[in-house]
Image: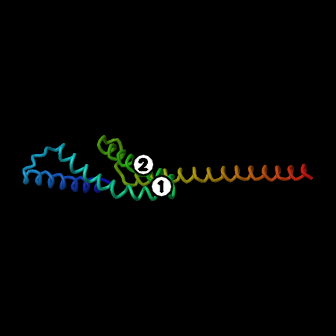
């Protein structure tokens, strides 16, 4: 995880230096906050333009799928943030396996929830069908 984080920091630093030197070279005179405004704003605008049509199509299939993707992403971000915080505070080891286990925990608990919901819906459907069948028999007997 440390290696991955250091590699990401190197990539971010490369692009930060690149955009800073580009700004200076073309005499834009942008400070760090202005660079963040334009660069991050542009990157995530492009991400939105790409992702939005995908989510529109997914919404026609299942809103649950969009919720799952959102929570999965949130879980991933929080898990990585916890690992970085542990590294910074020296309160634990920064380990990619911890992130993987966090994600596995979410997937296992989500799966358990879906199984429980399926079982409850099946029982509810069975009870409803049983009462409907009894009502049909009673209505048939009372009409004859």
Q: Position of residue 133 (x, y in %)?
A: 80, 53
Which residue extends farthest front? 143
Q: Position of residue 43 (x, y in %)?
A: 26, 54
Q: Position of residue 57 (x, y in %)?
A: 45, 59
Residue depicted at 36% across the width and 49% down the height: 80
Q: Position of residue 16 (x, y in %)?
A: 18, 52
Q: CA distance from mark 2 to mark 1?
A: 21 Å
Q: Determine which residue is flagged by label 2.
A: 75
The part of the image, by quadrant, that contains residue 37 is top left
Crowding at dot 1, Cα within 10 Å, few <14 / some 14-19 / many 20+, comes out as some
For the residues bearing labels 2 and 1, Cβ distance under 8 angstroms:
no
Crowding at dot 2, Cα within 10 Å, few <14 / some 14-19 / many 20+, comes out as some
Residue depicted at 25% across the width and 57% down the height: 7
Q: Is residue 12 left or right of residue 114?
A: left
| Element assignment for label 2 | helix
Q: How is the image coloured?
A: rainbow
The foreground one among 66 and 2 is 66
Q: Is residue 134 left or right of residue 127?
A: right
Q: Determine which residue is flagged by label 1.
A: 59
Residue 23: image tag? none
Quick one: label 2 or label 1, which is nearer the N terminus?
1
Q: Quadrant of the N terminus?
A: bottom left
| Element assignment for label 1 | helix
């Amino acid at each position: 995880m440390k290696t991955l984080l250091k590699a990401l920091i190197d990539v971010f630093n490369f692009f930060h230096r690149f955009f800073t030197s580009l700004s200076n070279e073309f005499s834009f005179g942008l400070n760090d906050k202005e660079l963040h405004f334009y660069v991050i704003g542009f990157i995530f605008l492009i991400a939105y333009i790409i992702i939005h049509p995908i989510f529109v199509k997914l919404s026609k299939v299942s809103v649950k799928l969009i919720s799952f993707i959102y929570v999965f992403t949130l879980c991933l971000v929080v898990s990585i943030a916890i690992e970085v915080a542990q590294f910074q505070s020296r309160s634990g080891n920064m380990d990619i396996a911890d992130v993987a286990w966090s994600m596995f925990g979410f997937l296992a608990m989500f799966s358990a929830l879906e199984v429980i919901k399926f079982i409850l819906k099946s029982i509810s459907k069975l009870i409803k069908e049983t009462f409907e069948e009894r009502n049909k028999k009673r209505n048939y007997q009372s009409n004859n």
